[in-house]
Image: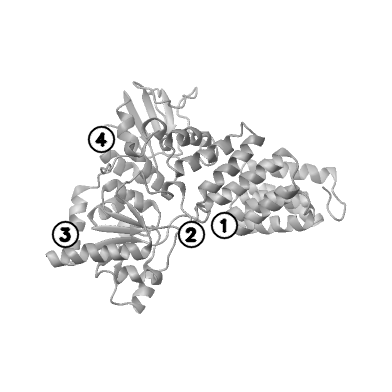
Amino acid sequence: MAGRSGRFTLAKADDLHKARALVEANRPAEAWALIERCLLDDPEDPQAVIVAGFMNIRVRSYALAYFFARRLTELVPKDPAAWINLAQACKFMQREKEGERAARQGLAIATLSKDRAALYQNLASIYMDAGRFAEAEPVLRKALELEPENPKFLANIGMCQLARHDWANGWKNYRYFIGTEERVRQVYNDPEEPLWDGAHGQTVLLYGDQGIGDEVCFASIVNDVADRCDKLIVNVDRRLARLFARSFPNVEVHGLRDQRWDSSQKIDASLPMSQAGEFLRLTDDDFPSDPYLKADADRVLMWRSLFATKRKPVIGLAWTGGLWHTGSKFRQHTLDALLPLFQSVDAHWVSLQYKDAQAEIDAFRVKHPEIDLVQYPHATLTQDYDDTAALVAALEHVVAVPTAVVHLAGALGTPCAVIKPTKPCWKFAHGLAFHPGVLIEPLNNIASMLRSAFGEKREAA
């Protein structure tokens, strides 16, 4: 494709080729210098616009990527690449309807298999981000027909299968994510150790590969894996090291996730912790209902002693969660929107926000001084999740959007209710199998449940 000014030269092509390589090498500043030079020469050069959009996706500047993609469809509306880019940008901007239209617009004109496969993949990704897993799976299978060996298509099919609790097939396909940006492959031996295949009698290392909440969620499998191993090593986010070491005393725990450490011991195999379900979680009944994490007993007692002075129910609350690219837009509430919850029971409400919420709490309490909502920053705004675990273990109940503290409450055995998300991730799509006791309900239902449960307690007292 040539720019409208016709100044597309071999030198410019070489610059853009180098820029793309620099983006892939995680050197965006150097890449942008080359891209900008091309855009300054011709700001409507489609090739330069494509690479500019690609770079902004990689550095998570989604708004800029979206505007570059929109402009590309205006410059070359009959080129499927333009619609591929726009559908992808809309996915990251969480513009579901526009992204769906862009993908279908591209499919209407695309003839090459690779273009059609990419458009099907983008459409499926938009559906999955919206929690529409049943619609995404057949679209992914269309992509797979065009590129039968594409691991990304298989991995996403696996996620759709896991969403509907088809565990055996889901885990098998989910494995294809290993080694991608979604699930970075960590290696601990030289030469590289193999991925664990569920075999008995080995020294195995499980490592965290997603967010801190995911590590807590998948940790329910640690003891089951340990039963198969001569020795099990677990490497997780440093914020979890102390909590996990106490909870799994027969396991060697490191808080060195994403880091290498010198070790003379030979590891027979390693695996992302999230993948071990392939061997040990093949039906809903395989997920344990008993707590598997242990908070510091002394600190739990200290919290309970404090809470006893409140003379009312003590309920933890998390009203926002996630990052932009993990759908935070669709799992957040304002405190005003939670008034039905606050009015359901006279409670001591404890903020479980992982970011400082004091200013928001102060503004809310000016309007609603009767609502007892507090933040204990030394328990929630720390770099050791053991602090938060002690607090959560002392609570009578937790109410939260889908976020890490839901998994923490489930792992500790603290009663928990999740405010039903409009666009759930695969774990929350059909109940939370990892924590069978955690309820997922609309806000008003949770308010009624709390009113009933704590009202009966007060009457009994």
Disc 1 element: loop
Query: Which mark is drawn over residue 429?
Result: none
Residue 450 occupies quadrant = bottom left
- Which residue was labeled with disc 4? 249
What's the residue type where badge 3 is placed?
A: Ser
Q: Is residue 186 left or right of residue 311?
A: right
Q: Amino acid at mark 2?
A: Phe
| Residue at x-position 48% and y-position 59% | 330
Asked whether residue 384 appears in the rendered view, the answer is no
In front of the other: 444 or 336: 444
Judge from the rendering whether residue 167 lies leftward or rightward of residue 413; answer left or right: right
Mark 1 crowd level (few <14, some 14–19, many ≥20, 10 Å Cα): many
Give the residue number, with chain letter if any, for mark 2. 330
Residue type at numbered disc 4: Pro
Residue 94 circle label? 1
Tell me which numbered mark, 1 or 3, is placed earlier along the sequence: 1
Q: CA distance from mark 4 to mark 1?
A: 43 Å
What is the spatial separation of the Cα atoms under label 3 and label 4, in whole angstroms?
27 Å
Up the image or down, 122 lies above or below 374; here it is above
Q: Are marks 2 and 1 in contact (CB under 8 Å)?
A: yes
Picture quarter containing residue 215? top left
* Coordinates of residue 329 in the picture (x, y in percent): 50, 60
Q: Residues within 10 Å of mark 3 (few under 14, many from 20)?
A: few
| Residue 99 picture location, percent across and down | 63, 55
355 up-or-down from 266: above or below: below
